[in-house]
Amino acid sequence: MRPPPQFLLLLLYLVYPCFSVDFLFNSFNATAPGVIFRGDARVDSSVILLTNDTNQYSLGRAFYPTRIQMKQTQNSTILSSFSTSFVFSVLPEIASSPGFGLTFVLSNWTDPPNALASQYFGLFSNATVSSQAPLLAIEFDTGQNPEFNDPDGNHIGIDLNNIESTKTAPAGYYNSSGGLVPVIMNNGQNVHAWIDFDGPNFEINVTVAPIGVSRPSAPTLNYKNPVIANYVSAEMYVGFSASKTTWVEPQRILAWSFNDTGLARDINTTNLPVFLPPSSSNSLSAGAIAGITIGCSAFVVILSFGLYRFWLNKKLKDQEEDEIEDWEREYWPHRYSYEELSQATNGFSQDELLGSGGFGKVYKGTLSNSTEIAVKCVNHDSKQGLREFMAEISSMGRLQHKNLVQMRGWCRKSNELMLVYDYMPNGSLDRYIFNKPKKLLNWKQRRQVLADVAEGLNYLHHGWDQVVIHRDIKSSNILLDSEMRGRLGDFGLAKLYSHNEVPNTTRVVGTLGYLAPELATIAVPTAASDVYSFGVVILEVASGRRPIEMGRDEEEDRVLIDCVRELYVEGKVVEAADERIQGEYGVEEMEMVLKIGLACCHPDPQRRPSMKEVVAVLVGEDVAAAPAELLSDLARGATGDNNDDGGREVAPSQH
Ligand SMILES: *[C@@H]1O[C@H](CO)[C@@H](O)[C@H](O)[C@H]1NC(C)=O
Ligand SMILES: *[C@@H]1O[C@H](CO)[C@@H](O)[C@H](O)[C@H]1NC(C)=O
Ligand SMILES: *[C@@H]1O[C@H](CO)[C@@H](O)[C@H](O)[C@H]1NC(C)=O
Ligand SMILES: *[C@@H]1O[C@H](CO)[C@@H](O)[C@H](O)[C@H]1NC(C)=O
Ligand SMILES: *[C@@H]1O[C@H](CO)[C@@H](O)[C@H](O)[C@H]1NC(C)=O
Ligand SMILES: *[C@@H]1O[C@H](CO)[C@@H](O)[C@H](O)[C@H]1NC(C)=O
Ligand SMILES: *[C@@H]1O[C@H](CO)[C@@H](O)[C@H](O)[C@H]1NC(C)=O
Ligand SMILES: *[C@@H]1O[C@H](CO)[C@@H](O)[C@H](O)[C@H]1NC(C)=O
Ligand SMILES: *[C@@H]1O[C@H](CO)[C@@H](O)[C@H](O)[C@H]1NC(C)=O
């Protein structure tokens, strides 16, 4: 195996120590960990384990091998900033034992003087007279030590060379409505932590959330005080420290990313190992488990329990939702119960049906707090496929943008997946442009919607390290919010269908008329094939016509792209414009929008503009200022050689 790229980066850094520090460990390699260890810390099955269970007093630290620069000179009071994020798991052997947790630390030394194990995190001394030394830690404390004024047994604190925190906050995160959702840090679950250290403002923000919850926008703990400059030296090691006494409590670091010039890169949380206690896979309470172990005839008890469950399952089969499986706990911001969704939609009543698209039915619902939601029911044949899909979608739960329809959560019942979205009161774009709509969008609104969707798609393509391909862009997947602004829905859903290999269907996913021609042969969607579909949407919106208008037979079918292209070749592209909005647009502007649409629909994926370029044109005030190179060669495909073009040829893949 090749060394991971972060390892190369590390080497680079060692050679050029003046470079900024930026690394990402999605797992740790025992032979080349990329970090240095002190005490009992080590790599154990691809994660850092900080303490050694068999030693009564054990402490361990893991540091990035080189110090990072925190200020120009020792005397300077101007601090540098950094951003870091990591995933940890703390799992006491006995749930009720007094635990300690772990710390993220900035230290002038890898072995801080007089550091003690047990409740001192292997970091602080028991000195009662506080002294200023370059040691600053953020504790994730899972035990209450009244002697240090700990508020409770599950908190986060800022420690300035002192085990007694200068500020603490209960572990949890603020949800979208500002409520604090507690995060239990010592039940083994993978906890994602983010620390933003704003040097110039002497501000530290700490945020925690379980894996699967997208990064909360408000920090759990905010500390701002120039005094931190006294605890920071010119260069410091960054890393982790933890310790234990009698009680066994493995503290693990599963992944770690760091950037001292900007935001730390995203950790890929999809395949991180999970260290949950063995009992978590069934729904027995901890108390019942203890009862069973204490009972001398545990076997009999388990057997009878099994029978009981069997009976119970049989009895509740149809009313009760499926047992939650382990992997499901890892995903999503919010798991709704089936009852909750059923209630919200009046038992999935036909009256609440908003529509039924390729992916299943969509219902309107109202939660008990009168929030309106849309519930999309997706049927799926295999649980395995569902699981992969969930992993995929879960990482997409982080995608948040004003021009995307926000996903709120999910629910699974058997092989049916229910995805919960924000409700979009105005429905989809297609209802406002084709045929004889109740309400016709005017040109200004259309321009706005196109710009909105372009921005949403640009975010999917370029807003992340990973390119997210939508795969099914069409006017019925573009929803209008209460202000008639456009939002892209259903992103990522198409992926479910490519995981789901049903015989008799090909793997091409998308919608006839919007599919890029190359998909007929390579079947691998790319950002460019999304651009193509978006180009079709542009043409639809400008012309008010569907991508394919069916004639009496195939000969008479009209492919929109071909029509527009022909008009373009004849030098009268503006004639493609929607007659119903005549007079609302400037001719130049309309021409340019149609040309951008054609450019996006270029038969050669390489020649299509990127969404960045499309946004620049559509969002820019002066649409006529589109760079000429985007608009060259628009005629291609309009004449005789257009057989590989226009979308018609992929028709068989749809049925
Ligand atoms: C760990 O690092 C060693 C040495 O660089 C390498 O040979 C090995 O393949 C790596 N293992 C993994 C799982 O990456
Ligand atoms: C843990 O400590 C024991 C006793 O000191 C030692 O024998 C063992 O090798 C240590 N385990 C690891 C993985 O370092
Ligand atoms: C830093 O401050 C100390 C004490 O205030 C002073 O003795 C020393 O010269 C200063 N160092 C620099 C580089 O300014
Ligand atoms: C940091 O540690 C170095 C030795 O590694 C020492 O020379 C320096 O004085 C220490 N800085 C402070 C502020 O204690
Ligand atoms: C601090 O710890 C040392 C070493 O464990 C011990 O000898 C000393 O008595 C402790 N002092 C206090 C004040 O607890
Ligand atoms: C936010 O958290 C609070 C407190 O836990 C809870 O009552 C509320 O329902 C949550 N809101 C959302 C939108 O999840
Ligand atoms: C820290 O959080 C506050 C909000 O509580 C925010 O105003 C500030 O910009 C954040 N600072 C950093 C460095 O993230
Ligand atoms: C670190 O942050 C800087 C500044 O935002 C950014 O340019 C750089 O790409 C970041 N590093 C990574 C790998 O994300
Ligand atoms: C995360 O890792 C999984 C497999 O380990 C991979 O399939 C997926 O594409 C990765 N996601 C990102 C965002 O890199």
Image: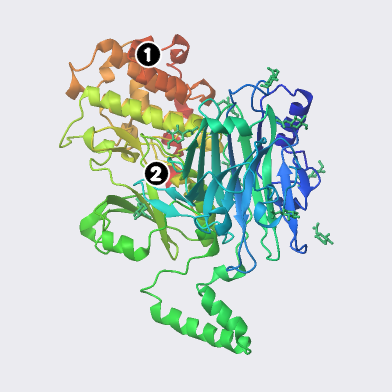
Rendered view: 411 above or below 545: below
Q: Which residue is at a point 42% across and 16% down the rendered structure image?
A: 635
Instruction: Please determine whether, in this image, residue 383 is positioned above or below residue 242.
Output: below
Query: Sequence-wise, which precedes: disc 2 or disc 1?
Result: 2
* Residue 537, quarter of picture: top left
Front in this rendered view, residue 44 or 388: 44
- Rendered location of residue 228, percent (x, y): 57, 33
Three-letter amino acid code at the position of disc 2:
Asp
Q: How many marks?
A: 2
> In the drawing, what numbered circle is on residue 569?
1
Quick check: marks 2 and 1 in contact, CB under 8 Å?
no
Lateral position of residue 381 relative to residue 594, left or right: right
Structural crowding at the residue carrying mark 2, measured as other residues with C-alpha within 10 Å and reported as few (<14), some (14–19) or many (≥20): many
Q: Which mark, residue 490?
A: 2
Q: Nearer the viewer, residue 296 or 507?
A: 296
The reply, left or right, for residue 408 in relation to residue 213 is: left
Q: Quadrant of residue 545?
A: top left
Q: Where is residue 397 in the image (x, y as percent from the top left)?
A: 45, 45
